[in-house]
Amino acid sequence: MNNDLENIIKPNARLYFVGIGGIAMSAVASIAMELEFDVLGSDSKEVYSPAKDVLEKSKIKYFLGYNQEQIKSSGADLFILSAGESEENPEVKYIYEQNLPHCGFAELLHHLSKEKLRIVVAGTHGKSTTTGLLGHLFKNLDDSSFMAGAVLQNYQSNFYLGDGNYFVFEGDEYKEEFDDPTPKFQYYKPDILVLTNLEYDHPDLFPNLEALEQEFRLLIEKMPDDGLIIYNADDASLTKLVNESNISSVSFGIDNEADFRVEQVQYGEFTTLEVINKFSKSVSSKLLGQTEQYKIQLPGKINVYNALAAIATLRSLGFAQDQIALDLITYQGVKRRFELVGVKNGVTIIDDYAHHATAVRETLSAARLRYPKGKIWAVFEPHTFSRTKATLADLATSFGDANEVLISEIYPAREKASEATIKSLDVIEAIKAYNSQLATDNSIRLIENKEQALNIIKAEAKATDVIIVMAVGSFNRLAYELKEIL
C-alpha cells in the first residue's frame, strides 16, 4: 500500500475493485457498499456465480474487460487489487505508473472492521468451514459479522455485516498483491487468532515449511498483549509456536491433552461429540472437567476438529454451552466442502475443494465413515505443478479409502504449462506404488478432459456408489454436470 487509508477513505469515498469477480473481492465490495461507500470495479471476463449473484444483489456496477480509460474516468479515491492481477493488466499498470492509491482487500477489510474485535481463522486446512461455523454462531448469538472464502449453505453468501462486537475473517496465508508477498492474514491484525493446523503448502511462495511457520510466528508476535489464541494441540508445529509466545491461549484436541478435548465421537447421520471442558474461565470450579455434548451435520474427523475450534472459541469468550449447541447443529457447511450435490439413480454425488494431500485424505476418510458400504469414486484434479510436485509423496498415500480413482491433467492456475516439472502420470504411478490394490484392479486412470470423466462415470457408476469430485480448476463444475447425465 502506498498511501494512508485513514486519510483516503472518507464518508462516500469511491472504491474501484480490479478483479471484482473473485469470491472474496465481490464480498468485500459488497461490504463496502453496505457501509455506504461508492463502489465499482472491473474483471477480465464474464463473472460467474456466486460472485455474480453477490454483485447483482448489491447493485454494484462493473466493467467486463480491462482498460486504462476506465481507471482514468473512474474518479476513484482508492483502487483495490486482486492478488491474481499483475502489471500485465493495463489497469494495474496504469495505477502503478501514476502511483495511484491502492491496496489489497485484506488491508481494506482491516480498516473497515477497526471498531470490532477481529477473529481470524488461519491454518492449512479447515479455514473456510471453521470460519463459516464461527460466523454462523456469532451471527446468531451476537449479530456479529463474518467473511469466509466460501459460500455458507445456510445463507447462500460468504459474508454478513451485523451490529455485534466481533468480525470473523478467514485468514488466507497467500500473498496480498502480486508484488506484495505479505500473507493476507498479516493485514487483519487479529485480536483473537484461531489456528486449525499447519502443514506445508504454497510452494510457489514459501520454499519450505519453516518459511511458512515464520509467517505464523510473525502473526502471533504482532498480536496485542491482551489477545487470545485458540489452537489445535494435536498439531506439533502450532503447539511449538504458541509455546514460544506470551499471548494467552486455549487449546483443543482429540489425541493430546487440551482445554477442550473430545472424549468420544460417534459418526452417523449426525456426528456426536463428547467434549471434556477443562478451561477454568468457562465454567465454575465444580463443573470443571465435566463432559459437554454437541452434534454437527458435517462428517469426518476433520470436521470434529473444525467444530472443536469453534466450541473452544465461543466457550472461552463466555458463551453458554446450550447456546452453542443449538446453533452448532444447524450449520450446514460451506459450498464445495463435502457438499452433497444430490443423489441420482442411487448414485451419491459430492463436490469438494480438496487440493492438498491431507485435504484429499480427510475428504475420502469422511466419505468412508458416512458411506461405509458404498463404492467410492475419487475424481481428483491436481492443482498447480509446484504443489503437486512438493506434495507427491503425501498424495500417493491419500487415496486409501477410494475404490476407483480418476486423475485429471494438472490444473496450472497461475503457473505456466510450459514450465511443468511434473505430469499427472507421475501422480498415478506414485499412487500405484503405494496402493497395490488400485494398481492390480486397474482402478486408477488418467482422464484427459471433463467429457471423458463424464462418459466413464455414466457408463460404470451403479446405485449405492459415491462419487467425490475434488477440483479447483476446469473440473470444478463436474459434480453438477454428473447430476444432469446420470
Image (spheres, helix red, strand yellow):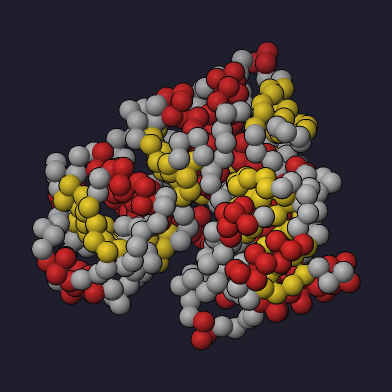
Q: Which corner quadrant of the image does residue 271 belong to?
A: top right
Q: Name the residue: 42% across, 24% down.
A: 142
Give me the residue at 12% from left, 66% from top: 72
Q: Judge by depth and name the residue closer to the eye, 437 or 243.
A: 437
**Quarter residue 484 falls in:** bottom right
Decide if residue 232 is on the left or right side of residue 218.
right
Where is residue 124 drawn, in percent x and y? 57, 55
Q: Position of residue 377 (x, y in %)?
A: 74, 58
What residue is drawn where x is 38% and y is 67%? Answer: 84
- Above or below, 138 relative to 104: above
Q: Is residue 87 left or right of residue 477?
A: left
Q: Nearer the viewer, residue 166 or 404?
A: 404
From this viewpoint, is residue 77 visible?
A: yes
Q: Identify the image quadrant of the C terminus.
A: bottom right
Q: Please identify the residue farthest to the bottom as the structure is shown.
A: 418
Find the residue positioned furthest to the top. 286
Q: Relative to residue 167, is residue 208 drawn left or right?
A: right
Q: Nearer the viewer, residue 74 or 221?
A: 74
Whole-percent x and y of residue 218? 46, 55
- Residue 278 visible here: no
Image: 81 above or below 344 = below
Residue, x 78% and y 54% (percent of image)? 462
Q: Tell me residue 474's x, y (percent).
A: 53, 67
